[in-house]
Amino acid sequence: MAGLAEWAGAETRPRYGGTLRVEVRLPGDSADPPQIGAGIADLNGSFAITQWDGGRRAVYEASETAAGGRPYLDRVEVELARPLRDQAIDLDLGKADLIELGLTELRRQPAGRKVWPSAPVRVLALVFGPRVDDARVREALSLGVDRGAIHRVLLQQQGEISGALLPQWLTGYAFLFPATADIARARTLLSGMPAAARSLTLSADDPALRPMAERIALNARDVGLTVAVGSGNADVRLTEIRIVSTDPARALTVVAAALGANPPARAVSPEALYAAEKALLEGFRVAPLFHLPDIYGVSPKVKGGPGISPLGEWRFENLWLEGGRP
Amino acid sequence: MIAAVKGWPAAFTALLFFLPAAATAAQDLSGAAREVARKTAAFAGKGDTVSVTCRNVSSLRPAALEELRGAFEAALREAGLRTNETGGGVEARLTLSEDQSQYLLVEEARKGDDRQVWIASWKREAAATGLPARLTLDKRRVWAQDEQILDAAFTEASMLVLAPSKVTVYGRGAGSTGQWEPRQSAPLTPPRPWPRDLRGRLRITGENFQVFLPGMVCNGALDSVPSMQCHAADEPWLLESGSRGILLANFAAARNYFDGRVVTQSGLRKTAPPFYSAAAVEDQGRTFWLLATLDGRTQIVDASFEAAGTIAGWGSDIAGLDASCGSGSQVVATRATDSSEPDAVQVFAVANRAAAPLAEPVAFAGPVTALWPAGAASVLAVERDLTAGKYAAYILTVACGN
């Protein structure tokens, strides 16, 4: 007869106490801790900051007056500006409890490693600057990107290929926006155009995205565009926009603001929302490519998760540590 | 962030001004199919032929595609259109999809170079969570609600449900089904914010009831007009086990466990390790207490609360029974796992300070957040639905001889 004793694991009820050690890549380069945005700022409320070594380290203590009750953890220590590779080593060595995982590292994780992904909330897109004023050039580059190959090779099939700004899980209609390459149509659009008009510069906001930018430049050559990958004030930017709300209408408003577009009217039906998003994409000023999740690697002693919301927010108030002291 | 992109916002804003008015959500899949079919009919023109293709990218069952096609084509025929698989004057591509709160029916319709998209939506239904009961530990769902259930107790005519915000008294409805209907609620005002993983205990004795909460005790009466008075207090909780074990135990007011200070039935005051739950068992004619301690083990102590052994592998919630099934007393224990995973409970006998399972585990779809004795042969288990976030209370009764 099967028995409960055969189930390995910890006690069912959460335990109070302990310090959660978190490592992140991004530096906190301001004099003060961040108050908004996914990540450290999410700790405010349930935890109170007691130490901020600008850019390097932050310490938060549990708040006795937190809504919903004091968190189980006594403390959260966040190491900032840790390269992804160092984070992975620290998790393996037991020096960290929660780390960021790069998309390409997911497959390198040992079997059984606990992983907390968010929903796909990071929209990777090409955003064209005002210098690219010929819509045919913009459309040609959008049609030339081989999203499938990039997804397979560079992204290791993490996240989703998309031609939409808002992800499928949020709207249910993202598949309506085409995301497949059409080399023949792209070449037709550019036929007869002088070489100077077919030359662009492309930059990646995040150095980690540079390999993808270089791949896009190769795709562009196939359709007759000359794209030079550089940095700084380029004609086209490969950038990341974050979905910050599970309300699709509000999410679209924030995306529009990030793109420098006027805020859309409040869409009160899926059809209206679709029309608003379609309008944002008309003219090919922005070409969505992928929707990617945040992914965290977690020590097996961290319980009560997931500590990451679908939007990638830190929700550590219900986490507890096996072996924490009451 | 991204630099401003000039030139297109004005056109975008103008377009938004003419967005379609709010669509009325459909009631169900058939309603959504009829809604987009009406638009298709207007787009096509009378007598035209519509070729229909359907696909499902939602979590709806595959049979939903047949229902969709049937409802859509019937509505088109009512509107005077003909349908076929391919080659119609209008091509209608239907996709069943979903977002976080509703299902969507998305139609892409083409007539020559003209392309239209219509989207109809309807609300998702809550997923069913019931599980079949097992033979030897009968599982019966007695109540479900959105707010956390801390405990529930029953008389012949009433059910009391303890939640973080209130105690509610229910009575049987007049109809043939005799559903529980709320009679009266008494709010709970905690002296300080409730701790996370709140726990509470409800006891009925005759026409009176008692509520134990962290740092607070309430006393009430189940008269014709139920009443309740609460006061801040660190009074010990009265823990029962089956029909014979009683223990007074101090609950740590800002935590989710008993701090270890206990008074036994004989009046003996002892300090044990802090524990989450306790159950009494009879082994070779002697009474032992089992304490589910904070280190994940279950400690066995004798009547004097001296250590007598340990049991590994159980969860932190245990409850004692006296089901008169030949082996004396039993213990029901949760599974040792994370509080965010589906749980299970199993009934055990304890002999020679070792536990032996008496029945197969009974599975729950979510974590068990409370497990309390509910009479000599029953326990009350509360399950949290991991998907919907709701709580359901079950009575688990030992059925002898099965």
Image (tube, rainbow, N blue to C red):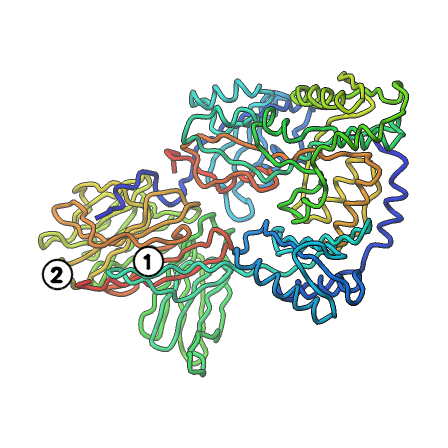
Is residue B183 depicted above or below B17 in this figure? below
- What kind of residue is marked 2? Gly
Q: Can see residue B129?
A: yes
Residue B15 - label: none
Q: Quadrant of residue B224?
A: bottom left
Q: Nearer the viewer, residue A308 or B50?
A: B50
Is residue A172 depicted above or below A235 in this figure? below
User: Residue most toward the front?
Assistant: B87
Q: In which quarter of the image is residue B49?
A: bottom right
Residue ID at (16%, 45%): B354
Mark 2, chain letter?
B
Is residue B359 depicted above or below A106 in this figure? below
Is residue B367 depicted above or below B130 in this figure? above
Work out which quarter of the rendered image holds the C terminus of chain A and state it.
top left
Q: Which of B48 and A96 is in front in this view?
A: B48
Q: Answer whether labels 1 and 2 touch (C-beta < 8 Å).
A: no
Q: Which of B381 and A212 is in front in this view?
A: A212
Residue that carries the numbered disc 1 in the rendered image? B372
Q: Which of A14 and B135 is in front in this view?
A: B135
x and y percent of residue A274 in the render?
A: 75, 49
Badge 2: residue crowd in 10 Å (few <14, some 14–19, many ≥20): few
x and y percent of residue B274 in the render?
A: 32, 43
Mark 1, chain letter?
B
Position of B221 with respect to A165 (left or right) is left
- What kind of residue is marked 1? Trp
Position of B221 with respect to B329 (left or right) is right
Residue that carries the numbered disc 2 in the rendered image? B326
Q: Are marks 1 and 2 on the same chain?
A: yes
Name the element at disc 1: strand
